[in-house]
Image (cartoon, rainbow, N blue to C red):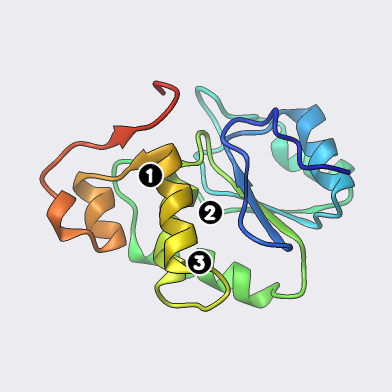
């Protein structure tokens, strides 16, 4: 099966890792058909754009659901450590990581690339930049001191 490019900001990191914005229930089934066994949600899990029945939907599809809720206004080092721990504890699994727009996730993978050889800095930056350029708190989170005093800038769709 080919990658489901109808999911907002779908990106393939490598053979075992994919990312996107919020998939709906049918799109989660498409992701499962790719062989994905673990779904990681870094979005709030409720509110605008969220799939409030996601945990149940993922379980019904036979996948593992992991929720790491990241406050978009305040990403933390603990959020990143939780993210890293999930990836490393499941290094032999096919994992899909998403949030609402793939902004949080692309920043997490960019930071992850700086500490792990599974993803190159260049590839992670290209993916992130194709979605957005983090500013303010997110620039600090990814270690981009030059952008700490500028607002977030979005590519493509105006989220």
Q: Are marks 2 and 3 in contact (CB under 8 Å)?
A: yes
Q: What is the x, y in percent for residue 24?
A: 71, 28
Q: What is the x, y in percent for residue 15?
A: 73, 62
Q: What is the x, y in percent for residue 52?
A: 65, 30
Whichever of labels 2 and 3 marks the residue nearer the N terminus, that label is 2
Disc 1: which residue: 71
Can you say which quadrant of the picture contains the N terminus? top right
Whichever of labels 1 and 3 marks the residue nearer the N terminus, that label is 1
Residue 75 higher or lower than 14, as above or below: above
In space, the residues marked 2 and 3 are separated at their CA atoms by 7 Å
Q: 153 or 81: nearer the eye?
A: 153
Which class describes the residues within 10 Å of circle 2: few (<14), some (14-19), or many (20+)? some
Mark sitting on residue 82: 3
Give the residue at x 82% y 52%. 63
Q: What is the x, y in percent for residue 62?
A: 89, 50
Question: For the view shown, which residue lies furthest in the left direction?
Answer: 149
Give the residue at x 41% y 23%. 159
What kind of element bears circle 3? Answer: helix
In the shown orientation, is residue 51 left or right of residue 138? right
Disc 2: which residue: 68
């Amino acid at each position: 099966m080919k990658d489901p490019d109808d999911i907002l900001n779908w990106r393939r990191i490598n053979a075992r890792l994919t990312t996107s914005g919020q998939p709906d229930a049918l799109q989660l089934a498409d992701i499962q058909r790719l062989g994905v066994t673990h779904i990681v949600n870094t979005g709030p899990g409720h509110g605008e754009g969220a799939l409030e029945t996601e945990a149940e939907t993922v379980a019904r599809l036979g996948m593992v659901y992991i929720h790491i809720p990241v406050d978009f206004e305040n990403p933390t080092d603990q959020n990143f450590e939780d993210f890293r721990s999930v990836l490393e504890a499941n290094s032999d699994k096919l994992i899909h990581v998403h949030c609402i727009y793939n902004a949080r996730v692309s920043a997490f993978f960019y930071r992850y690339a700086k500490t792990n050889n599974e993803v190159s800095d260049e590839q992670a930056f290209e993916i992130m930049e194709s979605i957005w350029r983090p500013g303010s708190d997110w620039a600090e989170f990814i270690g981009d001191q030059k952008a700490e005093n500028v607002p977030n800038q979005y590519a493509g769709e105006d989220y």
